[in-house]
Image (cartoon, helix red, strand yellow):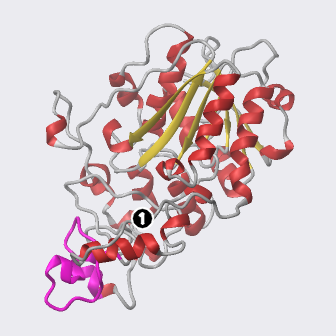
Amino acid sequence: MNGHHDAIPAIDLFAGAGGLSLGAALAGLDVRLMVDNDDAACDTLRANSRRHTGVVLEADISGLDGKTLRTRAGLTRDDPLIIVGGAPCQPFSKAAYWTDPGEDARYRRARSRGEDAAKPMPILHAKPDSRRSLVAEYWRLVEETQADAFLFENVPSILHPRNRVVVDGLVASATSAGYCVRVVKANAADFGVAQRRQRVFVLGSRRRRPHVPAATHAVRARQGGGLPPAVTAGAAISHLDRPRFAEPEEVVEGRWAQHLAEIPPGSNYKFHTEWAGHPEPTFVAETRFWNSLPKLSPDLPSWTIAASPGPWTGPFHWRSRRLRTTEMAALQSFPADYRFAGSRRERVRQIGNAVPPRLAAHMAAAVAATFGGDPAPAADLLAATCAG
């Protein structure tokens, strides 16, 4: 869909492995330029030139200006433009405050034991992190390019009290500049992605307020409404459970290997706790992140794919092995033929940091619809995707 002369041009800042660019293309946008400062991610974009026909610019956006972006994208000052992008999420992730200073963890642990505990006060101050300023850099380039519309993406914890000021500042700046803005919190599983991955989108347009994309799948039976059920992990990756897709790193050995083998599909470390009724508990509930020893169920959507998994951070396959990178990509709704550059660690990081293309397509379509006409039909977006 890229390269159509009548498509709305787009520039992707923080392009990463290209999930948002793929989604924008599925929504009918012409992604002219993709910017990222990570060499492995840029290699991935170049390796998929059949899908990414725009220019790949390996650069730090802090050193760019709006005129340069339009020039590199082959756009004049008067051409329409949509800026898309998601600044690095690490400064806003739940891990940034769940363990700092530990009061939230203690509260959850006490509640799991049935004890009375006072809920801790929200943490309103942010830990220093230079990456937080990249949201301001993103907005600066939206203004300098005089973009007609924009799409910003990040983790749901960007709405936590310590981070909310960042979103509120972005919305206030955009509103003052004449954009009609909508904040959308979405679960990827509601849009046909085989993964329960929540994300926040800030959608803005000078033309009219973007609509809230309607779910295409029902994660829970009570959602009903005639929607098909959520795509399960089994449906997305069972075809990859073959020897030819195997990776040496998938073998699980070491301290908790037997614990992982005993955990039933759909559960995590809590299986080995008194809270779950284990006769010989090893762990205490709510003392670890949810992604400690989580095992996929083939009958449910996956847990969130992590960008920096440790040796016991999942999700793990229901066969008690680590997921293959091909499986992670499929759970993110990347095309079956999509290539990721770099070592396994680099591929996992790129996949885990990506916006699921199928989810991105619906958000990009909502922004594109403000330019006139109806939003792209959900059925069309589903037909165009991805997972092979």
Q: Nearer the viewer, residue 335 or 203?
A: 203
Q: Left or right of 351: which side holds 331?
A: left
Q: Is residue 190 above or below residue 266?
A: above
Q: Left or right of 41: which side holds 256?
A: left
Query: Could you tell me if residue 56 is visible in this image?
Result: yes
Measuring from the top left, give residue 90's x and y in whole percent: 59, 59
Measuring from the top left, give residue 82's x and y in whole percent: 65, 24
| Residue under the image location 85 percent in, 34 percent down | 65
Snapshot quadrant of residue 374: top left
Name, please, the residue furthest toward the top.
373
Q: Nearer the viewer, residue 125 or 282?
A: 125
Query: Could you tell me if residue 320 is visible in this image?
Result: no
| Residue under the image location 48 percent in, 46 percent down | 337
Q: In this view, does 75 lie above or below 269?
A: above
Q: In which quarter of the image is the C terminus?
A: top left
Confirm whether the magenta stretch covers residue 315. Answer: no
| Residue under the image location 48 percent in, 36 percent down | 360
Q: Quadrant of the N terminus?
A: top right
Snapshot quadrant of residue 171: top right
Q: Nearer the viewer, residue 235 or 160?
A: 160
How many numbered marks have been drawn onto this rendered protein structure? 1
Name the amino acid type tagged 1. Answer: Arg
Measuring from the top left, give residue 251's x and y in whole percent: 39, 79
Snapshot quadrant of residue 384: top left
Q: Is residue 76 above or below residue 24?
A: above
Label 1: which residue?
324
Mark 1 surroundings: few (<14), some (14-19) or many (≥20) residues within 10 A: many
User: What span is colored magenta in the figure?
Assistant: 258-286
Measuring from the top left, give residue 247's x and y in whole percent: 44, 70
Confirm whether the magenta stretch covers residue 281. Answer: yes
Tag 1, which secondary structure? Answer: loop
